[in-house]
Image (cartoon, helix red, strand yellow):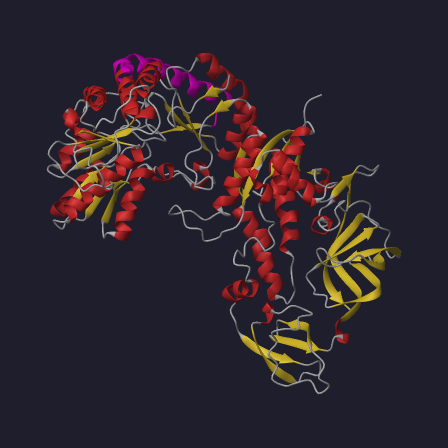
Amino acid sequence: MPIYFDHAATTTMADSAITALNNQLKKLGNASSLHSAGRSVRKDLEGAREDIANAIDCAPSEVIFTATGTEANNLAIKGLYWKAAKEGKKVIITSTFEHHAVMDPIAWLAEHEGAQVVGINVDRNGFIDLAELKQAVAEHKDQIAFISIMHANNEVGTIQDIAQVVKIAGNIPVHSDCVQSFGKVDLSFKKLGLTAATISAHKVGGPLGVAALILKRGLDIEPILHGGGQERDIRSGTFNAPSIVAFAAAAKESVAAANDRSVTVRKLKQELIQTIKKNVPEIWVNGDQEKSLPGIVSTTFPKTDSEGLLLLLDGEGIACSTGSACSAGVQRPSHVLLAMGLSEDETTSTLRFSLSHSNTITEIAKLGAVIASVVARSKAASGKK
Amino acid sequence: MKKLKVIAAMSGGVDSAVAAARAVDAGFEVVGVHLALSSNPQKYRSGARGCCTIEDSHDARRAADVIGIPFYIWDMAEEFHKGVVENFLSEYQSGRTPNPCLRCNEKIKFEAVLDRAKALGFDGVVTGHYAITKDSPTGKTLHRAADIDKDQSYVLAVLRTDQIEGAIFPLGDTVKTDTRKEAKERGLFVANKPDSHDICFVPSGDNAGWLRERLGSETGDIVDQSGKKLGEHKGAYTYTIGQRRGLALTVPDPTGEPRYVLKIEPKSNTVVVGSHDALAVSTISATPPTWCGAIPEVNKTLRGFAQVRAHGAALACDYKFDGTNLIANLDEPVFGLATGQALVIYDNDRVVGSGTICETI
């Protein structure tokens, strides 16, 4: 059996979600139709919406289903910007280590729509500089369209103090990409006081191709997709009822089990770090280990080449990740690690292992048995001095 | 016995895909690798340095998936730029006409890639080149392919013996039409993908325009062999020895004979033209020699065949190694030979050695 340490990329689909998906696939009806078949599907769908609202602690009407997390991030960012820009607010405050699905739409707005971007720096441990944020807010005040700061980072796992960000923001809308944190750690949309949050099904054991933007009630933003206006006139497209129902099943299970799983996964994480360190003493782990997701371990193996590490580990039946690649598949230095102060060479010597509750100590021991020789070969191939 | 592990360099074309599939059939443990080489200004993600075409890398990935082997992309853009593109430019600047495919085989596929593969624990590199290697008591030797129209031993003749040792060419005994047929039978959709002809890092195919963009287009004189000005050129390096068309000479030849580019002099930025007879070359010196096998005895004259262009004819010759250069005396003169191209010596179908042409008489 291959060993899978890449659960932050996508994870095993929960049995509850597979069952829900299968059952719903057999049901005929468009949830927007007025007849009984349509109403029956609509009933399932709205039930799912309530489950997801419960899972993230928001009102059901605040859940806007989208096809992907990327779409939800684009909708929040462009929608909030277009609304604010009408009032002349064109400053976007964000961190320097967001996911591309946040970073790139913001860059697009800067390039095409006159947005002015203020990037808040992160420290070596992977936390944004709150003093810098405070200063930026004070400086740009009425000019700020919105703030977008991710809840947990996808490469290093550190969790930002979003409550503090919202406090500093005052009346300024705050969006947070919660794709990695949802279902893993405590997350209350209401308590955090967010304006918008992004979550995605396949990171919590739901199917691919469904996600949601949680958007504060009463806030109307410009849509990206125009059509039937199914979701509050903010998102159009036929309801994907089977996937939404499966998303809800997975979210429910994942949030209910989060505390127990977190304990298990944290133990596995400690074991993984110790095992790697024992075999390759010169490694280090990026990002704070306390205020972080239970399952993400970003490890730098100095003087290696992560492409080579991945190839060799893959050959041993162990899956992990090197970070971002361009559309042609070429590895790029991680902007996350660069933002945290690593050198370009160090970023391309780094692997991300992401664990779930389904991983085992035995699997980690198998990694331990091969990692030293894998690292030695990758060092020889990297040419890094 | 433990399976030999090899890297299959997969360009996204039909040849390398079939070569990889055959390596699997032959019992190797094969890992497919696509090399991202050039810095074409393909726009995709901000901050990216650029890759070969995205379509090629997808084609290579799809072929690897169909064959059932792991697949990765290796970024060799920096090595390619240093080893191939910069060399290409500096050779033109020096008035020579380089062949970048040779440099790519020498510096990238069978050096950067082979070295990396070996360091990672692989035993060799598989490519879709049409050439044959044979075992001999002194090590592997390099030979012409069975399909003489597709033979690529010329562009591989720059490889040293140790590089040949790590090279595997599964298509050497095959004709191209059979390769395509086989690709189709194997369910590889690249079966009908057209062959690539242009220089890969000049995607427009406009070599002269590409050179002008990078080296400028300083005008200079076109002169006859006595130094008399006959016209003007727009950048000496955009001309090739033996070129007849596009000279736009303002002074006609008194005899009415066509004139050809004989020489490019980068220092004086001059292009020298003359009659066809003046293009005749009988003696070729090439340096530094690379030997695919035993080094010939110094100053001993041997019989063989010279090839001076990719897909050019095999020219009967005497050749010798004078200790520094490889020198060929052709039985019949050849016309319009540019320095910078490779001289490859064959003993029948076996590659003896090669060098970059530095002087022609």
Vertical order, A48 against A337 (above or below)? above
The residue positioned 47% from the left and 30% from the top of the image is A301
Query: Based on the displayed image, in which of its 4 quarters is residue A241 positioned?
Result: top left
Residue B196 in the figure: left or right of residue A363: right
Q: Where does residue B186 sit, x and y in percent of width and height? A: 61, 33
A93 left or right, relative to B232: left
Is residue A385 visible in the rendered image? The answer is no
Q: Position of residue B260 (x, y in %)?
A: 69, 74
Pick the residue in front: A98 or A282. A98
Residue B104 at x, y percent in the picture: 62, 49
Q: Which residues are magenta?
A: A253-282
Above or below for B24 versus B358 = above
On whether residue A276 falls in the magenta region, the answer is yes
Using the image as rendered, state which of residue B189 and residue A339 is in the foreground.
Answer: B189
Q: Position of residue A173 (x, y in %)?
A: 15, 38
Residue A301 in view here:
yes
- The quarter in which the N terminus of chain B is drawn is top right
Q: Quadrant of residue A272?
A: top left
Is A332 on the left-hand or right-hand side of A64? right
User: Magenta region's main secondary structure?
Assistant: helix
- From the viewer's side, name the closer residue of A29 and B200: A29
Residue B136 painted magenta = no
- Extreme residue toward the bottom, this view: B254
Name the image quarter holding the C terminus of chain B. Answer: bottom right
